[in-house]
């Protein structure tokens, strides 16, 4: 049977999609990029914020219409929205044939084999992790391992590796712990085995992901597990870059910073979502730390890791955020000078502790604050971009630009795929630049957030 698959949301969700596709191919099914030719349509959903939920619903409805065009065609919904709104989806969209949550990654394979939809919470959990459920419900316990089939959909030269699943934090705005379950780390041996397999397939860049990558191993009682993992991965032949995503301000230890500084394949890139910089907002968000502690941490990182690229995200419009709180956030951005900043407007999510707070910042104010921060960040980046002209750096070629057909683009070590700006290559023959190649370049220009470089 042919499967048409739509994966929405973050890279963590994308890995789940790749595992589901791998299981389907293992069982003899065909994956098609043409949904109109599919026997089974699958939507792997996101439900993190309102915009993501709306995109998921719109996609499900689009696939529901497509289902009607062929007799016998099936529609399966998986992922975070399926975990969170299982019964509501079944009731409101009767075209859905099966619903599988984040803990039921094997569900699609079983559906394709004729088993059909299962009750939640029955997917395989690895034996090394067992914790009691919280919040009064059964939480997902599934996590894949190196032996799990996986069909990668990223370009050949880079791959996401999920080193852990779930989250034990209780941030006031976040529903992830209820959708993904407790934090559970994979064994180092499993991750290294998977990384070796990926290297043998031509992968040059590993992107390590989880809800909090610096919490890795803590749930298993393993001290210094992340630096140990990084050192093991650093020794794998064929891997050129190792990138850490989704770090946390209270679990990024000096040992982790030292590993990033010392290991030659670990890129000097820190992705540290801070969410805010006003102490009062951070407290209401149930986030650790203060502005002062964040400044000390970032100064320490810059001192230990010269030329490090710093990326962060912030939420504006959280309940009770005053003009003074917003001003504190804006001045923080100016003080630190981040390389990459993402700004989200607060979304009032049921099931979170912040939902009990009055959503008292208007939608218009949220949008205005988001736009103001991004405009300020654009100005700050523009100054730094000009200072980089003439700089020489190493770059990975990602291939033809989606926006400019005859232009090749790539990324520096300080740029993660999909989420960060890119580098456009000039003064070169595109046919001589293989996707996944690492080349030396000179930065010769800047276009807004992006850079222009010529190969050396």
Image (cartoon, rainbow, N blue to C red):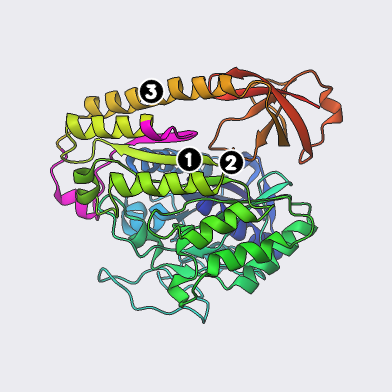
What are the residue bounds of the magenta stretch? Answer: 335-359
| In the depicted structure, whether residue 166 falls above or below residue 283 | below
Q: Check if residue 345 falls in the magenta segment.
A: yes
For label 2, the SS is loop
Residue 183 point in image, percent of width and height: 42, 67
Circle nearer the N terminus (1, 2): 1
**Label 2: few (<14), some or many (≥20) within 10 Å?**
some
Q: How far is disc 2 from disc 3 in space, using C-alphas?
A: 22 Å
Q: Residue at x 59, y 63 (%)?
A: 112
Circle nearer the N terminus (2, 3): 3
| Residue 272 appearing in the image | no
Q: Identify the mark at residue 416; answer none if there is no mark.
A: 2
| In the depicted structure, whether residue 237 falls above or below residue 158 | below
Q: Residue at x 37, y 69 (%)?
A: 139
> According to the image, label 1 marks what residue?
311
Q: How far is disc 1 from disc 3 in space, using C-alphas?
A: 15 Å
Task: Classify residue 253 as left or right of residue 111.
Answer: left
The residue mark sitting in front, 2 or 3, is: 3
Task: Classify residue 333 as left or right of residue 102.
Answer: left
> According to the image, label 3 marks what residue?
376
Circle nearer the N terminus (1, 3): 1
Q: Where, by quadrant of the figure, is residue 328 drawn?
A: top left
Residue 61 point in image, percent of width and height: 43, 40
Q: Check if residue 122 falls in the magenta segment.
A: no
Label pair 1/2, CB-CB below 8 angstroms: yes
For label 3, the SS is helix
The residue mark sitting in front, 1 or 2, is: 1
């Amino acid at each position: 049977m042919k499967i048409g698959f739509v994966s929405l949301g973050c890279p963590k969700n994308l890995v789940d999609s790749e595992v589901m596709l791998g299981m389907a191919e293992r069982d003899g099914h065909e994956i098609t990029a043409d949904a109109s030719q599919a026997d089974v349509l699958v939507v792997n959903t996101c439900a993190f914020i309102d915009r993501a939920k709306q995109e998921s619903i719109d996609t499900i409805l689009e696939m529901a219409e497509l289902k009607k065009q062929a007799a016998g065609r099936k529609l399966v919904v998986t992922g975070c929205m399926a975990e969170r709104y299982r019964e509501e989806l079944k009731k409101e969209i009767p075209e859905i044939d099966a619903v599988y949550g984040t803990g039921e990654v094997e569900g699609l394979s079983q559906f394709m084999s004729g088993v059909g939809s299962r009750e939640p919470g029955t997917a395989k959990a690895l034996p090394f992790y067992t914790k009691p459920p919280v919040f009064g419900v059964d939480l997902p316990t599934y996590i894949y391992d190196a032996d799990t089939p996986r069909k990668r959909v990223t370009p050949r030269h880079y791959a996401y590796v999920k080193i852990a699943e779930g989250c034990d934090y209780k941030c006031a705005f976040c529903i992830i712990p209820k959708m993904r379950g407790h934090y559970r780390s994979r064994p180092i041996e499993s991750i290294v085995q998977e990384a070796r397999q990926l290297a043998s397939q031509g992968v040059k860049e590993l992107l390590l992901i989880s809800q909090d990558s610096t919490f890795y191993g803590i749930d298993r009682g393993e001290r210094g597990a992340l630096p140990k993992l990084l050192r093991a991965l650093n020794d794998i032949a064929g891997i050129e870059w190792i990138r850490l995503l989704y770090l946390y301000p209270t679990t990024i230890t000096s040992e982790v910073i030292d590993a990033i500084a010392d290991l030659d394949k670990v890129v000097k890139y820190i992705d540290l979502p801070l969410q805010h910089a006003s102490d009062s907002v951070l407290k209401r968000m149930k986030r650790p730390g203060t502005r002062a502690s964040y400044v000390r941490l970032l100064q320490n990182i810059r001192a230990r890791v010269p030329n490090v690229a710093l990326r962060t995200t912030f939420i504006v419009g959280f309940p009770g955020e005053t003009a003074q709180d917003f001003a504190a956030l804006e001045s923080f951005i100016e003080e630190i000078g981040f390389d990459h900043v993402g700004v989200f407007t607060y979304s009032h999510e049921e099931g979170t502790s912040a939902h009990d707070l009055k959503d008292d910042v208007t939608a218009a104010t949220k949008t205005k604050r988001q736009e103001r921060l991004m405009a300020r960040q654009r100005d700050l980046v523009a100054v730094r971009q000009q200072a980089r002209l003439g700089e020489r750096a190493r770059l990975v070629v990602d291939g033809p630009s989606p926006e400019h057909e005859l232009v090749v683009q790539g990324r520096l070590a300080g740029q993660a795929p999909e989420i960060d700006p890119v580098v456009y290559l000039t003064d070169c023959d595109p046919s001589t630049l293989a996707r996944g190649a690492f080349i030396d370049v000179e930065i010769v220009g800047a276009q807004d957030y992006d850079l222009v470089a010529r190969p050396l």
